[in-house]
Image (tube, rainbow, N blue to C red):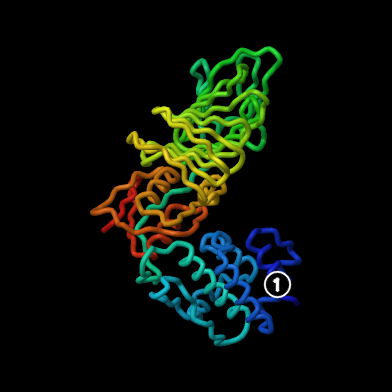
Amino acid sequence: MQETDIDNLIQRWTDGSLTAAERSQLAELLEDLNHKDMVINILQRHMMEGNATAAFDEIRFLPLLREVLGADRGMEETNKNAEALNEDEGQNEIVVRPVRWMWMGWRVAAAVLMLAMGTALVMMIRRKGTVRDVAEQRISVNDALPGSDKAVLTLADGTKVILDSAHNGILAEQGGTKIVKPENGRVRYDAGAHREVTENLLVTPRGGKYQVTLPDGTQVWLNAASSMRYPTAFTGRERIVTIRGEVYFEVARETGKAFIVKVNDLSVEVLGTHFNVNAYTDEVMVRTSLLEGAVRVKDGAGQMVTLKPGQEAQTPGNQQVMRVVGGIDTAQVMAWKNGLFQFRNTDLASVMRQLARWYDLDVVYEGKIPTDRFDGKIPRDATAAQVLAILQKNQIHFKIEGKKLMVLP
């Protein structure tokens, strides 16, 4: 079998697209020692290129390993045959010592893959500076489940609709506009020929997210602890919505109708574009990040900037001058929408704020806030305990009691 064939099988294994026949083929492949070096090289290449940090993490990799190899038994014994990770303090990178093949059979293959899993896990999140300890550590947690599709829709008459528990179909009808929840769970507005404009409010709690299609076809995603106020029909020359928290827009183009997003005293005007606004009140600034098209950002002091794709307008809350930053990491900006926490030189306090919103937890620091900074990715469908266990590998210690997440000294 060619290396490209093996590479394809492993990649399809991690993204869940393997057929039953291909799964059996992969299991036989992993038992064949003629391919052992090729398998190791493929796994290491994926991890070093950063292509598999989500796919090969502890949360998703282990169930796949068990499914393909049937390796529930003997896993702990096997793992002892993989040599420990080493560190290179000069380059501040996690490196792997070569695997020594102690004996034959599928358990050896399992050992290699378990080592690969552990490597990816530690590489995925690491402290800026010297990594002092990558040994397995215990964490004292009660755990908290990840967020999910949860939101409350408040109609013009004050009626509240709990969207996550509402049945699919027509939720309400206001002034000739039907509010529909289709089978995919995303709310949309179907406007009739004669309609009266009313106003709705969509709110996601901590631990929630939601997607809605506005009357003009604009797609909107709300992150946890966010809200959007908007009309049930856009009838004038402007389409205006008001938000708080973090919201991503894919704006439908309508000739001669500007789309305007308002947050505090800031306004973002677009004609047809993809952009993200992060306006949480506990962050130091509002960030308007442009992925596609063009937007014009205007603050309360009358400052105005026009963004190009890959640029971000940063608007501090202390009346300082708004600035434009180019070359932003759009993957990091969009990570929340794509089901990831993604950190790039991110301080611990910022990491904790994201976790607090997604897991509905209150963060308490028992002592000074650590100054550590992090790089890496973690899937947002992990539980709080799984995420904290990854962070704790870098000597940050935590404890969860009820809704309280304590960062220990």
Classify 83 as above or below 168.
below
Q: Horizontal placement of 295 versus 287: left or right? A: right
SS label for mark 1: helix
| Residue 208 appears in the figure | no
Quadrant of the drawing holding the N terminus: bottom right
Quadrant of the drawing holding the C terminus: bottom left
Residue 166 in percent (x, y) is at 58, 30
| Residue 403 appears in the figure | yes
User: Label 1 sits on what residue type?
Assistant: Ile
Say which residue appears at 66% left-offset and 30% top-offset. 253
Which of the 4 quarters of the picture holds residue 393? Answer: bottom left
Q: Nearer the viewer, residue 2 or 105?
A: 2
Residue 232 in percent (x, y) is at 59, 20
Residue 298 in percent (x, y) is at 47, 30
Classify 13 as above or below 379.
below
Residue 56 in percent (x, y) is at 56, 64
Classify 163 as above or below 78.
above
Say which residue appears at 61% left-offset and 64% top-offset. 64
Q: Nearer the viewer, residue 357 or 61?
A: 357
What residue sits right under mark 1 in the picture? 6
